[in-house]
Amino acid sequence: MRTSSRIGCCCTGSKRTSCNWRGQEATLTCSDRRKAINTRVENVWTVIEDTHAQAENMRLRSSLMMALEDHIQRAGMTQAEAARVLGVTQPRLADLMRGKIDLFDLDALVSMAATAGLRIRLSIDHVKSPPQPR
């Protein structure tokens, strides 16, 4: 998965423009490509987004998108079949399958998951101290 964001860079003061991750391992790359920083994070979105609220929103959206993609693949549906079942266009479904997270809001993803017959559970935990804005 790949995304772009503007995060102040610790190595040059420039802006980071890419972040690649697999699981909990994130690689942040500076726009000048001089240095890559490998770090383990619980939620990669906390590194990418400016606020805790934005990070949580992105975490929820990415979880829903991955669940929908997994459901479609397990069902062996083509994009056209899945689009019909979910009530969206095939190009819209293609955006989902390509991970274009910026094109989907939580409401749309929850509706698609419910239409697909997926059960959505929400877990809310209290944090000791709220993350400070950057």
Image (tube, rainbow, N blue to C red):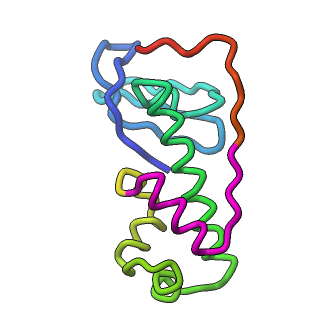
Q: Using residue 47 as the reference point, say whether residue 127 is left or right of it.
A: right
Q: Is residue 42 above or below residue 63?
A: above
Quadrant position of residue 51: top left
Q: Residue at x 53, y 35 (%)?
A: 56
Instruction: Tell me where residue 68 appears, x and y as whole percent.
Output: 59, 66
- Nearest the viewer among 117 and 66 is 117
What count of labels does the image hold?
0
Q: In terms of depth relative to the viewer, which is nearer, 67 or 121?
A: 121
Rendered residue at 35%/56% (across/down): 103
**Residue at left offset 49%, top offset 12%:** 132
Seen in the picture, residue 116 relative to 101 is either above or below; the reply is: below
Examine the image and state in which quarter residue 59 appears: top right
The foreground one among 35 and 73 is 73
Image position, residue 117 (x, y; %): 66, 73
List x then y, in percent, for residue 91. Answer: 35, 76
Q: Residue at x 71, y 52 (%)?
A: 121
Does the magenta segment cover residue 109? yes
Is residue 121 part of the magenta span, yes or no?
A: yes
Q: Which residues are magenta?
A: 104-122
Quadrant including the C terminus: top left
- Locate residue 103 relative to residue 117 in the image: left or right: left
